[in-house]
Image: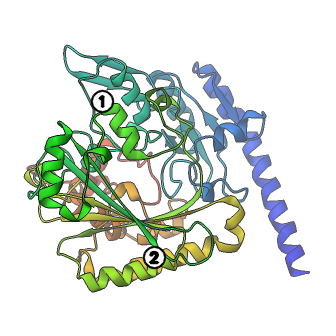
Amino acid sequence: MEARINIIGAIVLFLSAFLVSSATGEDLAFCLSSSGVKNFTTYYTTGDYLRLLNISIMNLRYAKPFVNKPVAVVLPGNKEQVAAAIRCSTSASWTIRLRSGGHSYEGLSSRDDGPFVLIDLMNMNRVSVDLDAETAWAEGGATLGEIYYAIATSSKRYGFSGGMCATVSRSGSPSDMAKLLHKWQTTANNVLEDDYFLQLAALPGSSSNQSAELISVFFSGLYLGPKASALAITDRVFPELNLTAQECAETTWAEGLIIIRGDNAVRTVEDLKNRFSYQKMFTKTKFDYVETPIPLSALESALKMLTRQPRASVLFDVHGGAMYRIPSDATPFPHRAGTLYGIEYFVDWPQEEDADYGVRYMKGLRRLYEFMTPFVSKNPRRSYVNSVDLDLGAIDWTDEKQLCRFDAVEVARAWGEKYFLGNYDRLVRAKTLIDPNNVFRHPQSIPPFPTKTLTRTGH
C-alpha cells in the first residue's frame, strides 16, 4: 500500500510540474519567438522534445525518466540568439544550462534540481581555419572532432592541442589537460623528450559482472618525428616494452589521434565530424593527482581491487616536460610542477546491467578511490575539474533558506581548491566581476562574492 501511495504521489508531482511548465513555457516561447529565436521546443509540446534533450546526454544516469527536465530546449544558431535565449530565460527567473558536447561526467550541462532552460549550442559548430595566420576559430558548440576534421582537411602539416575524445566540445576541454597533440602540452617527465607523449591504462580483461581474472594494460604514445627516433627513446627509457618497428605507425596528425583513441566508431578522418559517434553508457568517474611515487605494493593491491571491479578502469596521465615550466597561476589549471601524473578512475556499464549492478559498480569505484588516499596528493586531495565529481560536495542553488544560512564562497572552497588550488580566490573575484548575479551556475560552479565584499588585487 505504501508503494502505491508513493507512486500516486510521484504521478501527482509529475502532472503538477507538467502543468506549471506548460503555462510558463508558453510565455518563454512567446519571448523567444519575438526575439527571433525559432529553433526550440518546449516541455513535451512536440515529439522532438525528448530527442533533442537526450541526444547529447552522454552519461545515461542522467537520461532516466525521473531526472528533472528543462522547460525548453533551445538551439540557437548564432551569438545573438544565444543572448536572446538568456534574456528570455532570466527575465522569467529560469535557471540556465548551457550544453556544448554533453560530456559532463555528472550531467551538469543537462539537468538542474529546479525549473530551467537548456540552451544547446550544437548548431553553433562552425570552424574557420586560417593557414596563413596559423590560427583556427571555432564556435562554442564545435566538438574536438569537428575542429580536428576542419584542420586535417585544410592541411596535413598542422595540428591542434585538444583531447582524444572527438565528441567533447572545445569549450569543455581546456588544453591544459590535453591528452596529446603537440610538444608543448601534456608530455612525459623530463626523462623523456618533450616531443613524446605517454599514457598508461589498466583495465580488467572481463566485461561481465563477474570478477576479472586478468588485468589488461595499454601503453599509448605519440612522437612527433620518424618512428626510428621514437624507438630509440622507448628502447632507452622503457626497454620492458620491447617495442618493435612493426608496432609503430607513421601517420598524419589526425590519423594518429584516431589510432591512439582506439574508438571503433571513429576509424577515419571523415568520422571525426560525427558528433554523435560516442557510445553512451552509465558512468561514474573520480580523479587524483600523484606527487610522490606510489609504492609497488600499493599498486599491486590496487590492481587486485581492480580485478574485483570487472567494468572499472584506471588511466594514468603522465605530466612533466613543458607543463612544469608553466607557472601554476598562469591559468586556472594549477597542477604543474611537482605533479607526476593524474589518475582517472572510471567505471561504465550498459542499460541491461544498471538495475542489478549500477550501484554496486559505483561503490566499488569509491572503495578503490578511498584505498588510494595515503598515496595521492594531500591538503587538499587534488582533482581535475573536467572530471567533475559531486562526491566532493555541491551547492543546491534552489534552496533559498539554505543559501541565506551559509557563505557560498567558503562552502564551494571545499571542492574549488581541490580543482584550482590557490587560483580559487582569483576565480571567485573574476566570477564576481563577470557574473555578479550568478546567472551561470551549477552545483559546483564558482560562486560570486556579495558585491560589497569585492576588493581588487594585483592580479
Of circles 1 and 2, the one toward us is 1
Q: How far apart are the alpha carbons under marks 1 and 2?
A: 35 Å
Image quarter for residue 175?
A: top left
Q: Choose between 392 and 182: the one closer to the eye.
A: 182
Q: Choose between 7 and 294: the one closer to the eye.
A: 294
Of labels 1 and 2, earlier in sequence is 1
CB contact under 8 Å: marks 1 and 2 = no
Where in the figure is residue 144, as x and y percent of width and height? 40, 35
Q: Choose between 43 and 368: the one closer to the eye.
A: 368
User: Which label was assigned to residue 442?
Assistant: none
**Looking at the image, can residue 135 be seen?**
yes
User: Which label was assigned to residue 306?
Assistant: 2
Disc 2, SS:
helix
User: Which label was assigned to residue 252?
Assistant: 1
- The residue shown at (35%, 32%) is 254
On screen, 114 above or below 7? above
Where in the figure is residue 122, as x and y percent of width and height? 52, 31
Type of the residue with mark 1: Thr
- The residue shown at (58%, 29%) is 75
On screen, 378 above or below 287? below
Where in the figure is residue 287, as x and y percent of width and height? 36, 66
Disc 1, SS:
loop
Where in the figure is residue 429, as x and y percent of width and height? 24, 52
Type of the residue with mark 2: Leu
Q: Is residue 348 left or right of residue 254?
A: right
Q: Is residue 124 left or right of residue 199?
A: right
- The residue shown at (34%, 24%) is 152
Q: Choose between 277 and 14: the one closer to the eye.
A: 277
Other-residue count near label 2 (Cα within 10 Å), few / some / many at <14 / 14–19 / ≥20:
many
